[in-house]
Image: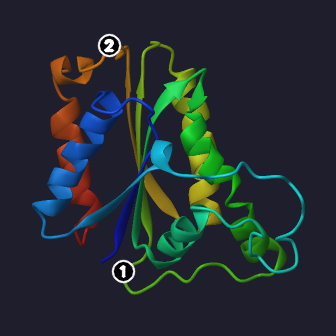
Amino acid sequence: MKIIAFFGSPREGGNTELLLKETINGIEDSGFKVHVFNLNRMNITPCQNCGGCDDTGICIYEDDMSQIYEAIREADRIIIASPVFFFGVSAQTKIIIDRCQCFWCEKYLLKKPIPEGKHGRKGLLLLVGGMKKEIGIQCSEATVMAFFRTVNVPTHETLGFLGIDAKGAILKHPTALVEAYNAGKKLVSKGG
C-alpha cells in the first residue's frame, strides 16, 4: 500500500506537524511507510488558469509538482495536514490543490479518472486552528473534499482541532494525539 502525506504548515515542529507525526506513528506501527512532502520547502508555481491542461489533463508547468502528480496517481492513501488560516487551508496546501486542476480536466472533461487500485483510495485530513469557530474546519474540509474527489479519493476522515494556537499547544489537548494515532491505524486497516 502506498501512502503519501502533504505537510502544509510553514511552522516546523508546530501543532500540525506534531499531529501528522502521531498519525504516521500509527501507520508505521501497522507496518506501512509514509512518504511525506514538506510543501513549504518545495518549488511550486501557483496555477495560472491558462487552460494548458484542458485537452490533455497534463499541467504545462514543470516544477516540484511533477513528483506530487506521480505520487497522487500511485497513492492508495492520501493525508493532508494543514493549519487553518482565515477559515481555509494554508497557502502551501492550497497551491497544490489548485495545481490539481489538471486532474479535474482528466476526470471530468476527458473522462479518465485515476484508477482506484487494488487497495482502493482513502484520505485523511488533519486540521489545527487557533480560532474556536467551526467554520474554519468546515471551509477547509470543503476545499480538501473537492480535491479528494477530483483525485478519485471517494472517502476521507477529518480530524480538526480548534483553539490550538501556540507552538506545541496540541500536546496539552486531552485526546488529539491519541485520535491522530488511531486515525493513522484506521486509514491502513482492512476495515478502515
Q: Are marks 1 and 2 in contact (CB under 8 Å)?
A: no
Up the image or down, 79 lies above or below 70; here it is above
Q: Is 45 displayed left or right of 176 in the figure?
A: right
Is any part of residue 183 visible from this angle? yes
- Look at discs 1 and 2 and give the one toward the viewer: 2
How packed mark 1 is, by other alpha carbons closer than 10 Å (few <14, some 14-19, many 20 or more), is: few
**Percent position (x, y) of residue 168?**
24, 21
Q: Residue at x 87, y 69 (%)?
A: 52
Up the image or down, 113 lies above or below 191; here it is below
Q: Nearer the viewer, residue 157 or 171?
A: 171
Give the position of the N terminus as an image quadrant: bottom left
**Percent position (x, y) of residue 31?**
13, 70
Q: Which residue is mark 1?
A: 119
Up the image or down, 170 lies above or below 98; here it is above
Q: Is 12 displayed left or right of 44 in the figure?
A: left
- For the residue marked with disc 2, what is the amino acid? Ala
- For the residue marked with disc 1, what is the amino acid? His
Q: Nearer the viewer, residue 113 or 89?
A: 89
**Tag count:** 2
Q: Residue at x 29, y 43 (%)?
A: 20
Q: Secondary structure at mark 2?
A: loop
Q: Which residue is mark 2?
A: 166
Is any part of residue 192 visible from this angle? no
Q: Is 13 displayed left or right of 155 in the figure?
A: left
Which circle marks residue 92 in the picture? Answer: none
Q: Nearer the viewer, residue 6 or 109?
A: 6
Q: Earlier in the sequence, mark 1 or mark 2?
A: 1
Q: Residue at x 74, y 75 (%)?
A: 58
**Percent position (x, y) of residue 44?**
62, 52
Q: Secondary structure at mark 1?
A: loop
**Percent position (x, y) of residue 88?**
59, 30
